[in-house]
Amino acid sequence: MKPAQTCRVGIIGYGAIGARVAADVAAGRVPGASLEGIISRRPLSGAPAGQITLEQALECCDLLVECAGQEALVDHGEVVLSAGVDLLVTSIGALADRGLSKQLHAAGPGRLFLTSGAVGGLDLLSSGARMEGYDRVTITTTKLPGSLVQPWMEDALVEQIQSARGPLDVYQGPAAEAALLFPKSLNAAAAVAIAVNDWDSVTVRVRADPGAELTSHVIEASGNVGEYRFEIRNKPSEENPRTSGVVPFAVLRSLEAIIGARGGLM
């Protein structure tokens, strides 16, 4: 048997997600992976690897992990894939843009991978969609009010959110629109839409709740295949309350699955 070849990994972004992913890869906690460098707009301090440019990363990396937000995927996704470098995406809400999604899926020879992030049950949802499809799919996301305020909101809505004393419904609409309106908060909704392969049929409800100690995602789906209900309650990241603390570990699990250095539950 040939020895497994080391996968040279680079990280795009060094915030709450990227910093933890970089630390674990550098510490050898992802079998078969080595950290080659970190791409960041800001100077790095105390990072476990050197700061490199995207151009340098395309020369020295086999796989890049996007941890920098939708803008980074829009700006760099096609370039990475066209250079023959694989790309693992955390900001999957950007794929609600049909043009971008088509562009990235058509690019290559690098491969495009998506991480499940802070939401579970996607394997069963995807299996049911392949078998029969669904009559109804909804996801209700509840977060602290401050993490849901967006630049496009009118002052009256911002005030209503910030002064809420109890649960307040902020938005309801299709996943394609929701993922673009809340680019840093609704990757879970995007994950559900991608799992069932239908951005338009998934209804998203966004709820602000000042008493929400945990970020909640309630996913419901029904059809000929059956009826499913999942509730995920995650602790927010201490570094960035817009994301769940479990997300970096979902990324690390995705890395292990891509590299395939050892077997496991898929």
Image (spheres, helix red, strand yellow):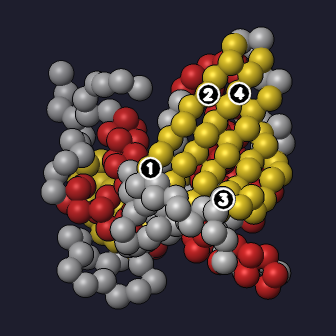
Which image quadrant: the C terminus?
top left
Amino acid at pointer 3: Pro
**Would you name the residue on which mark 2 appears?**
229
**Would you name the residue on which mark 3 appears?**
167
Which image quadrant: the N terminus?
top left
Give the CA distance from mark 1 to mark 2: 16 Å
Give the CA distance from mark 4 to mark 3: 23 Å
Q: Are marks 2 and 4 in contact (CB under 8 Å)?
A: yes
Give the CA distance from mark 3 to mark 1: 17 Å
Disc on the earlier residue, 2 or 3: 3
Where residue 56 sits: x, y (%)?
39, 72
Disc on the earlier residue, 2 or 4: 4
Residue 166 falls in image quadrant: bottom right
Give the CA distance from mark 4 to mark 1: 21 Å
Determine which of the numbered discs, if any, sits on residue 234 in the image: 1
Label 4 crowd (10 A; few <14 / some 14-19 / many >=20): many
Position of 218 with respect to 31 (left or right) is right
| Frontmost residue, 15 versus 143 | 143
**Which residue is at a point 35% across and 41% down the rendered structure image?**
253
Determine which of the numbered discs, if any, sits on residue 182 in the image: none
Q: Are marks 3 and 1 in contact (CB under 8 Å)?
A: no
Label 2 crowd (10 A; few <14 / some 14-19 / many >=20): few
Position of 92 with respect to 203 (left or right) is left
**Which residue is at a point 41% across and 78% down the rendered structure image?**
40
Where residue 88 sits: x, y (%)?
48, 51
**Which residue is at a point 23% across and 71% down the rendered structure image?**
49
Give the CA distance from mark 2 to mark 4: 7 Å
